Amino acid sequence: MTSKLCKVFLLWLIPFSLIAQEQKLNKKRFNTVLIGGGTLYTVSMVGLGSVWYQDFGRFHFFNDNNSWGYMDKAGHTTTTYQIGRLSAKSLAWSGLDHQNATWYGGMTGLFFLTSVEVFDGLSEDWGFSAGDFAANALGSAAFISQELLWHEQKITLKWSYSGSPYAQYRPELLGSTSGERWLKDYNGQTYWLSANLRSTILQNASHVPRWLNLAIGYGISGYTGGSSNPSENEAGQAIPEFTRHGQYYLSLDVDLTKIETSSKWIKGLLGALNFIKIPLPGIEYNPENGWTYHWLAF
């Protein structure tokens, strides 16, 4: 199946080749983007197929919409959005015009994660999730629509991680090392809608820094299982009872793409890192503890 996905990816690249012939591009840069993206995709799919997915069966669907307090859906949307954003920037760097770079780049995340969903659909342990696919499509739409309407991302989808005490009870599922936990432990993750103030509600406020954002965040706490918390982990050890609830945040943030610098390298680095919500003061509300102030909301 991996070889079939690689062939689909090659077919998907054909429109890029046609555009390269019709427009004045920096062909060296354009080829670099295509080869780099194609290589990354192929390696990722081969790696997933051989390591993560070991038992393939008949294609089937799986409804996981009620798992992990919708955090996995927020993750899919944010990941697709950010892949699209970075892909579009790469294509623009190669000389592709804005509209084509937006469409082709913005769809890259959807294509990539749909391939992963196909793996899930053929895996005996999972299944193709219509909810995940919808979340992926929403992420692509969030990038493409803003770019076509405003030629900028007024509202950016971001991510942050601060760790949680819950992974220790199910390390097999939530991660046994700090490197695994930032990816697997939803309790430590927060997903944000970060709106640039000067681009939205304070357009005429010249005294407000152009890089200042206001962010709304969502996270969860107390989850040691997807749809419910088990009484013991895979090793047979008892897990304490935790109250599962959502957490809601309002905080300041920084749009790294709007920080002025004369260095192209620094500007590129800041743009690449703009998926991370910057730690700044904020407030939190959750049903368990009510309102809480954080000197650094992350």
Image (cartoon, grey):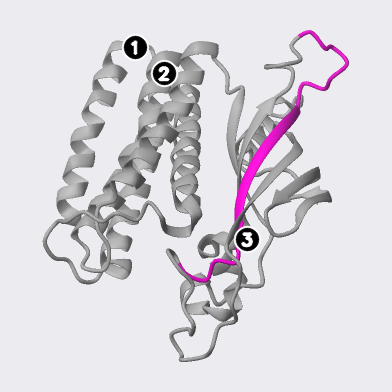
Depth check, mark 3 against mark 2: the one in front is: 3
Q: Which mark is residue 23?
A: 1
Is disc 1 placed on a helix, strand or loop? loop
The residue at the far left in this view is 58
Residue 266 appearing in the image: no
Disc 2 marks a residue whose amino acid type is: Leu
Q: Does 71 appear in magenta?
A: no
Is disc 2 placed on a helix, strand or loop? loop
242 lies above or below 256: below
Left or right of 177, for residue 231: left
Left or right of 120, for residue 199: right
Q: Position of residue 53 (x, y in %)?
A: 27, 66
Residue shown at the point (52%, 90%) measured from the top left: 237
Residue beneath disc 3: 188
Q: Does 210 appear in magenta?
A: yes
Disc 1 marks a residue whose amino acid type is: Gln
Residue 142 appearing in the image: yes
How would you rate the neighbour count of disc 1 (Cα within 10 Å): few for under 14, some for 14-19, many for 20 or more?
few
The residue at the far top in this view is 204
Q: Which mark is residue 96?
A: 2
Whole-Å distance between the Cαs marked 2 and 1? Answer: 8 Å
Disc 3 marks a residue whose amino acid type is: Gly
**170 and 6: which is toward the camera:** 170
Q: Position of residue 86 (x, y in %)?
A: 50, 34
